[in-house]
Amino acid sequence: QVQLVESGGGLVQAGGSLRLSCAASGDTICISAMGWYRQAPGKERELVAAITSGGSTNYADSVKGRFTISRDNAKNTLYLQMNSLKPEDTAVYYCNAASLCDEYDYWGQGTQVTVSS
């Protein structure tokens, strides 16, 4: 099994920056792709950014050029650098990790990001 713990959320003004972290533990050797998702009130959870074990990335159109996903495999940590934040980025952000060992997607508990206008 894999455990994921997010941190770094908070309240920021529009135009500001935040850096989210997701620390993985447990069977981390099984992790392949990882990603960040978000869910705003009344909306479905959506993919924000993803990164493969080899470092290939993809982003939602709404965050391209503003957010950067990265991972430090030695530290078993996933990051999301968020710049030029907008009120519409307000959501609970979740870390996701795909495990090849049990073919299961693991989720963190989420961290709240609130962007004020």
Image: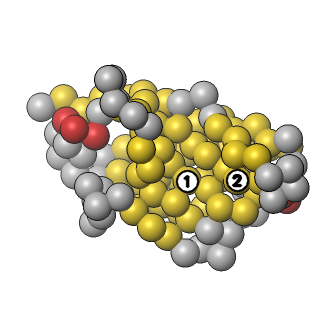
Q: Residue at x 49, y 70 (%)?
A: 57
Q: Look at the picture and state if 99 lies above or below 55.
A: above
Q: Residue at x 80, y 42 (%)?
A: 2
Q: Is residue 92 left or right of residue 14?
A: right
Q: Is residue 13 visible?
A: no
Using the image, tell me which numbered label, if any, was put on residue 102: none
Of 14 and 26, which appears nearest the observer?
26
Q: Look at the picture and state if 32 lies above or below 77.
A: below
In which quadrant will I find the N terminus? top right
Total marks in image? 2
Q: Amino acid at mark 2?
A: Ala
Q: Earlier in the sequence, mark 1 or mark 2?
A: 1
Give the class, few, some or many, for how many residues have Cα within 10 Å of label 1's Cα (few <14, many ≥20). many
* Furthest residue toward left: 117
The image position of residue 106, as x and y in percent, is 70, 41
Q: Where is residue 105, by image quadrant?
A: top right
Q: Where is residue 109, by image quadrant?
A: top right
In which quadrant will I find the C terminus? top left
Using the image, tell me which numbered label, if any, was put on residue 35: 1
Q: Secondary structure at mark 2?
A: strand
Q: Amino acid at mark 1?
A: Gly
The image position of residue 63, as x and y in percent, is 30, 56
The image position of residue 25, as x and y in percent, is 80, 43
Q: Which residue is mark 2?
A: 98
Q: Is residue 28 left or right of residue 6?
A: right
* Furthest residue toward top: 41
